[in-house]
Image (tube, rainbow, N blue to C red):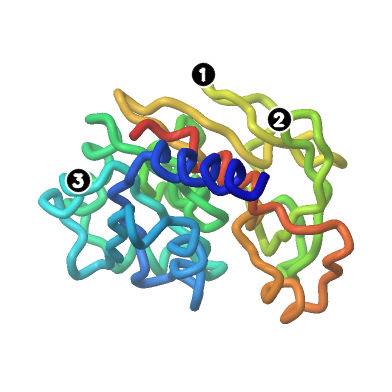
Amino acid sequence: MKTLLALALLLFTCSAPARDVGIFNGAGVCPGCAEAVAAFFDPQRDTVQYLNESNLDSARLKRISLYVQPGGSDDIDETLDALRPAQIQALRRFVADGGGYLGICAGAYLAARYSSAADKKPAYGLIALPELNAETASAKPSLLPIRWGGRERMAYNQSGPHMGKTPPPGASVLARYRDTRRIAALSVPYGRGKVVLIGPHLEADASWYREDGLSLAHGLNQDLFRQALSSFPD
């Protein structure tokens, strides 16, 4: 039996596609957030590089298939002010040409057309929503009930955004916040590429919960985060 299990694990590992991933770890990214995402990739198979405002350009984007914008500060302008318009345009072209964009919490906010619709300050513009807003008024970490694929989970949230109740054209809803029915995660095409936005921190490990005094009784949600990663083409 142990031999069969080992063989099954080996076959699964060998069949898992290698990935070329770029994770932004520059201005506005919270300490440890980029590394938390990197932990989901196999260092023996996947190529992971960290990008920032100094090295993000078209040449580096051509070397990856998936770009990840992790969680960050409460002010996404920290990231936007550090990037040149040409760098944001290069990111848009990367996705439009077939790349993947995964935005988590602050990374989801950044995907909207504006950081502030009232001020008309441009953001990444990868989704047909003018601006995203926080699901809760409090910035304190908490557990929020979400429904993902018919299953209810308690998800780690810290100022995570919602995406309204009605998805933008072409989008698929992955999860909703249970109490408000607003969208917590979605997938939407952008040109030939794909954008996945997630409000809560499904990538959070047990250390996040312990540090913020949150109960682990309901378990983690890293399996859902792996589902989100597996939805991107190789």
Q: Residue at x 18, y 65 (%)?
A: 55
Lower position in the chain sequence, tag 1 or tag 3: 3
Relative to 182, residue 220 above or below = below
Q: CA distance from mark 2 to mark 1?
A: 13 Å
Which percent across, then down, holds residue 116?
Answer: 49, 51
Q: Nearer the viewer, residue 172 or 165?
A: 172
Residue 213 drawn at (x, y percent): 82, 78
The mark nearer the N terminus, 2 or 3, is 3
Q: Position of residue 1 (x, y in %)?
A: 67, 44
In the rendered image, the quadrant that contains the C terminus is: top left
Q: Which element carries disc 1, helix, strand or loop?
A: loop
The numbered mark at residue 90 is: 3
Looking at the image, which residue is at 21% across and 60% down?
56
Residue 201 vs 95, above or below: the answer is below
Q: Are marks 2 and 1 in contact (CB under 8 Å)?
A: no
* Distance from Cα at disc 1 to Cα at disc 3: 24 Å
User: Which one is nearer the viewer's eye here, 21 or 83?
Assistant: 21
Q: Amino acid at mark 3?
A: Ala
- Work out which residue is located at the far left of the displayed protein and give it: 59
Tell me the element at label 3: helix
Q: Amino acid at mark 2?
A: Lys
Tell me, for residue 110, which label it has, or none.
none
The residue depicted at 22 percent of the width and 37 percent of the height is 93
Amino acid carrying label 1: it is Pro
Q: Which residue is mark 2?
A: 165
Q: Comparing marks 2 and 3, which lies closer to the viewer?
A: 3
Q: Quadrant of residue 180?
A: top right
Residue found at the far top of this picture? 170
* Residue 118 visible in this rendered orientation of the protein: no
All told, the count of numbered labels is 3
Q: Is residue 206 or residue 89 the one in the foreground?
A: 206
Give the residue at mark 1. 169
